[in-house]
Each structure stands twice: as C-alpha cells, then as structure tokens.
Amino acid sequence: MMGALIATFLTATVEWVEAYTIVLAVALSIGWPRALGAAGVALLFLAVLTTAGSLILTMIHDLAILQFVIGVFLTLFGVRWLGKAIARGAGLKKLHDEDAAFAGLRARADIHEARAAWWIAFNGMLLEGLEVWLIVVALGVQTHHTLAAGSAAIAALLVVCAAGALARKPLARVPENTIKFVVGSGILSFGTFWILASLGYDWPLGDAALPVLFAFYGLGGLGLIRLYSTKTLKLGTV
C-alpha cells in the first residue's frame, strides 16, 4: 500500500506543478478569483470522475479481469513516463521547462480575454489532473485504498499550492524528470506485476517482487540513458 501511495503522491506532484504554471499565467491576466474558480471546477469534475471510475471498476467481480485491465493501464502509463524520462535524461529530448512554459502562456493573445483565459485554466487543470485521476483510480481500486490514494493526491495539491503561494512564480526547481523516472519505474512495476498475476503467473516472492521489478526497470532505464548519452556524444563529435 505504501508504494502505491508514494507513487500517487509523486505523480500528482508533477501534474499539479504543471497545472499551477497554467493557473498562475491565467491569474496574472484575469485575476486569482477567476483563475482559481476555473481550477476549482476542473478539480470538482475530476472528483466526480474518480468516484465514477472507482464504482465502474469495482463492478468487475472477476479479480483476474480487474487485475489485467488495471495492469494494462498502469503499464502504458509507466512506459510513457519512463520512456520520456530516459529520452530527456539522455539528451534526446529537451527537459520540461516550467519557466519556458509560463513565458509561452503569457505570450498567448487569448490569455488576456476573460472567457478564453478561464477555459485555458480549466482545460489546463483538467488535462494535467486526468493522469492523477488514472493513478488514483487504478492503484486505489486494486489495493482497496481509493480514499487513501485520493488523499495522497490532495496532499500533493496542498504542497504545490503552498509552494506556489510562497514562490509566486513557476516552480521550475522541482526535479520533474527525476520524479517521472522514479514514478515511471514504479508504475511499470505495478502494471507488470498485475498483468502477469492476472494471467495466472504465481510470483515466487509475492508482493516482495515489486521492489525487484522496480530495481529492474530503474537500473535498465539508467543503462539506457548512459547508452544513448554515449551515442549522442559520439554523433556530436563526428
């Protein structure tokens, strides 16, 4: 359970940091009340989605099917995050820059129009929050601790809000790529574990296999970063 809560908290932290950048940019144009109102509506929508998604998944009474469905979702999510982290770590893709994202938003012409800016804040919070929703529902339902997973996501939101209130600027110092690498490895471990378990594989170590899988994906990812970094350097010197 603790691993699932940590993964949820870290995932939510990254997404809320990116959402904060969007809300901050909008708030400087149309004011904090409207920007926070748009973000609040998006969070309410996400809360409804979380409740609905949890109820739908709990209607699947066959444990094997439930494990398989959730395992596939988590595997796809983990591969996406870990793949991006590896590419950025190896220099194949630029690191995500909150300052640059903020500057790009502030340069948009429509951000100074009240209705358009409201939708920018709403869509930004909603789209960033959808990945949080996926993790909360998937890990929460599978571990039978949806409320705890939701609380971890809310805790991350409060931490980001507090940091944003103190900084009053984009939270560019948050090591997003490192967090994505760790979370990607962890989520991929959960996904792999549950997919194979749903197909009848009996893990010799039981739940203790999860740290082993995490180490496997983490070390493998670091190896790929080193491999592709070396190739990039060689190409750069040619």
Image (tube, rainbow, N blue to C red):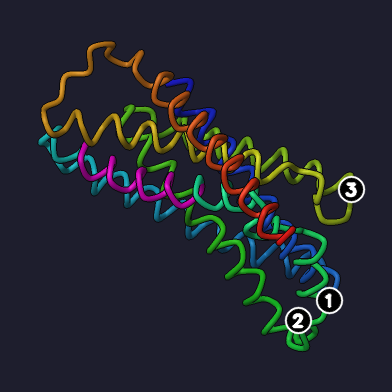
Per the image, the residue denoted by label 1 is: 29
Residue at 51% across, 48% down = 81
Image-based side of 159 in relation to 106, left or right: left
Determine which of the numbered discs, if any, sits on residue 111 in the image: 2
Residue type at tag 1: Ser
Percent position of residue 106, x then y = 82, 76
- The answer to whether mark 1 and mark 2 are in CB contact below 8 A is yes
Nearer to me, 104 or 19: 104
Residue at 45% across, 49% down = 133
Percent position of residue 53, x then y = 32, 50
> Which residue range is magenta in the image?
67-81
Percent position of residue 73, x then y = 32, 48
Check disc 3: other Cα within 10 Å, few if <14, some if 14-19, many if 20+.
few
Nearer to me, 182 or 83: 83
Q: Quadrant of residue 24?
A: bottom right
- The answer to whether mark 1 and mark 3 are in CB contact below 8 A is no
Determine which of the numbered discs, if any, sits on residue 167 in the image: 3
Residue type at tag 2: Ile
Percent position of residue 177, x then y = 65, 45
- Between label 1 and label 3, give the one nearer the viewer: 3
For label 1, the SS is helix
